[in-house]
Image (tube, grey):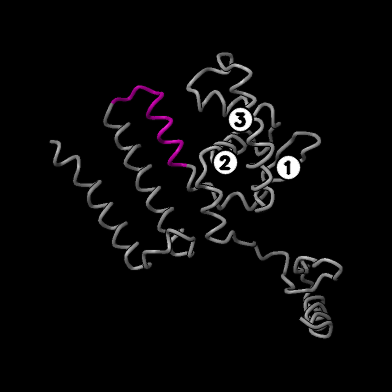
């Protein structure tokens, strides 16, 4: 985008009273930033499909997102690590040891939270050890509901039927995420065409729907 084009775009938006955000390309070494777009502030950005898949494919990142969602969008790293460690080891908070807590803490600190921050779904302050959800994280919420259903089935003692339904839902969600990755062109998943992924999803749903009838 040339300087003249940028000026014209900004002037046009000023005339309509629209607040704008200037999007720039990464600054190259020994170079300057280049403007690639001018967006109205009321246009909500969307996560790319491959970014969505990358964030959701790891259970610990899903756990971090769910923990933040359940705690008004804010948490400390130490509390989050303790919660996830207890969940991963199927123990109460007071039952986990320092090694279990430290393993999760380091993984979140060094890998998972920086990745989530780079994607724009959280604000992560390493020095303070605080994490806060950003608005963009709302696009991930529908995919977290399957994990919540599975957890509820395993903890409330409602019987094998509900647990089996949760497992089936989790399997379908996994296939759906894989199909999303295939359509997005993620290496490995892109071996199947979008049409074949659609067939896989349809067959999977039919199989899951038929299983209760076969058992009966």
Place residue 103 in its image quadrant.
top right
Element assignment for label 1? strand
Q: Is residue 143 above or below residue 31?
A: above
Task: Select label 1 or label 3 by which is in front.
Answer: 3
Residue at 59%, 26% (x, y): give it: 83
Say if the magenta span includes residue 189: no
Residue position marked by numbered label 2 in the rendering? 61
Crowding near the residue tagged with mark 2, few <14, some 14–19, many ≥20 C-alpha atoms within 10 Å: many
Residue at 77%, 69% (x, y): give it: 24
Give the CA separation, mark 1 to mark 2: 13 Å
Residue at 44%, 58% (x, y): give it: 188
Q: Which residues are magenta?
A: 145-159
Element assignment for label 3? helix
Crowding near the residue tagged with mark 3, few <14, some 14–19, many ≥20 C-alpha atoms within 10 Å: many
| Residue 19 image position (x, y, % from top left) | 78, 67
Residue position marked by numbered label 3 in the rendering? 104
User: For this rendering, which residue is in front, 8 or 195?
Assistant: 195
Place residue 36 in its image quadrant.
bottom right
Which numbered marker is on residue 124?
1
* Residue that protrudes farthest toward the top in the picture: 94
The quarter of the image holding the C terminus is top left
Give the CA separation, mark 1 to mark 3: 16 Å
Of pointers 1 and 2, the one earlier in the residue sequence: 2
Element assignment for label 2? helix
């Amino acid at each position: 985008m040339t300087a003249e084009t940028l000026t014209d775009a900004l002037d046009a938006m000023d005339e309509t009273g629209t607040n704008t955000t200037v999007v720039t390309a990464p600054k190259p070494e020994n170079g300057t930033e280049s403007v690639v777009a001018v967006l109205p502030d009321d246009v909500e950005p969307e996560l790319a499909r491959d970014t969505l898949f990358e964030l959701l494919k790891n259970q610990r990142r899903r756990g971090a997102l769910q923990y933040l969602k359940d705690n008004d969008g804010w948490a400390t790293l130490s509390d989050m690590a303790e919660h996830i460690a207890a969940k991963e080891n199927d123990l109460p908070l007071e039952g986990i040891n320092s090694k279990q807590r430290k393993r999760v803490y380091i993984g979140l600190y060094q890998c998972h939270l920086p990745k989530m921050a780079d994607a724009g779904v959280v604000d992560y302050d390493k020095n303070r050890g605080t994490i806060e959800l950003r608005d963009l994280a709302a696009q991930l919420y529908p995919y977290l509901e399957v994990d919540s259903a599975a957890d509820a089935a395993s903890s409330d003692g409602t019987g094998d039927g509900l647990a089996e339904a949760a497992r089936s839902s989790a399997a379908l969600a996994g296939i759906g995420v894989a199909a999303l990755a295939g359509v997005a062109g993620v290496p490995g998943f892109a071996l199947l065409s979008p049409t074949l992924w659609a067939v896989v999803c349809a067959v999977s749903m039919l199989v899951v729907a038929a299983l209760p009838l076969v058992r009966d």
